Amino acid sequence: MRTGDLAARTGLTTKTLRFHEDSGLLPAPPRTPGGYRDYPDHTVTRFSFVRDAGARASHSPRSARSLPCATTAMHPEPTSPN
């Protein structure tokens, strides 16, 4: 799904989605042959988790530091078959 579609489904702006990606909270999505971001469906859950956790973490620096670990543990990146 494209960035605009993901923004609509999560209630976040496209700028916020790219910020989370650039800051390392979420991994970079694959790209289409035309260079557009192509987010997998499970990304909606990840961004929703980060959005909700970020609201709580703003009150706790310790929580904010654990967000990258939590999102990876919650939804590990799929591995490609060999």
Image (spheres, rainbow, N blue to C red):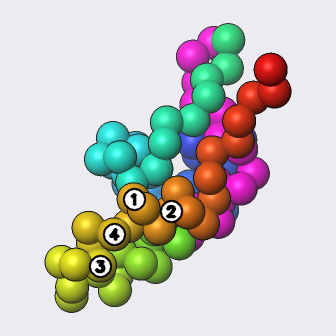
- Residue found at x 35% / y 74%: 54
Name the dominant secondary structure of the magenta segment: loop
The amino acid at mark 3 is Ser
Q: Which residue is mark 4?
A: 66
Residue 8 appears in the figure? no
**Residue 76 or 44: which is nearer the viewer?**
76
- Residue found at x 60% / y 66%: 74
Q: Position of residue 62 (x, y in %)?
A: 22, 78
The amino acid at mark 4 is Ser
Label placed on residue 63 = 3
Residue 27 covered by magenta stretch: no
Q: CA distance from mark 2 to mark 1?
A: 5 Å
The amino acid at mark 2 is Thr
Q: Which residue is mark 2?
A: 71
Q: CA distance from mark 3 to mark 1?
A: 10 Å
Q: Is residue 68 above or below residue 24?
A: below
